[in-house]
Image (cartoon, rainbow, N blue to C red):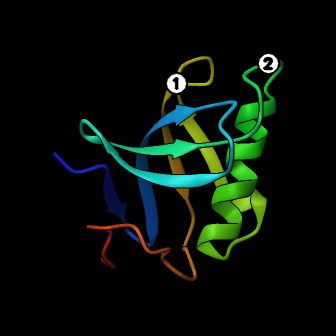
Amino acid sequence: MSFYRWDGEDLILDCHLQPKASKDEFAGLHGDRLKIRLTAPPVEGKANAHLLAFLAKAFGVAKSQVSLESGELNRHKRLRIRAPRMLPAIPGLQCA
């Protein structure tokens, strides 16, 4: 199983989030999920908001085009990125 799939023009990502890291970055795979390290703490939705902004910038879209589909209170998250304009350098990630 892959950490991503395409749903038409939308990219669905399965992620493992590590909050309170030293920097924001894609950190390879964690099992069958993409590991993402974020500097934001996991309180009051701050990590989720930071994650959406981080992904929007990485994929060249507006924050409104990134949505959390599942895992709001969990480290394992599924996200939808509507029509990404660019793909960051993540090993294995390819266009549809």
Which amino acid, by three-letter code, is at mark 2? Val
Q: Residue at x 37, y 61 (%)?
A: 7
**From the viewer's perspective, is residue 1 above or below residue 45?**
below
**Residue 76 location, x and y as percent?**
45, 28
Q: Residue at x 44, y 62 (%)?
A: 11
Asked which secondary structure carries label 2, the reply is: loop
Q: Residue at x 52, y 45 (%)?
A: 36
Quadrant (top left, top right, bottom left, bottom right) of the N terminus: top left
> Viewed as shown, does residue 7 lie left or right of 54?
left
Farthest residue in the front direction?
22
> Viewed as shown, does residue 51 lie left or right of 1?
right
**Residue 43 location, x and y as percent?**
79, 18
The residue labelled by disc 2 is 43
The quadrant holding residue 46 is top right
Q: Earlier in the sequence, mark 1 or mark 2?
A: 2
**Residue 25 location, x and y as percent?**
58, 55
**Residue 82 location, x and y as percent?**
57, 65
Quadrant (top left, top right, bottom left, bottom right) of the C terminus: bottom left
The quadrant holding residue 15 is top left
The residue labelled by disc 1 is 75
Choose between 12 and 43: the one closer to the eye: 43
> Viewed as shown, does residue 29 lie left or right of 58?
left
Q: Residue at x 24, y 35 (%)?
A: 31
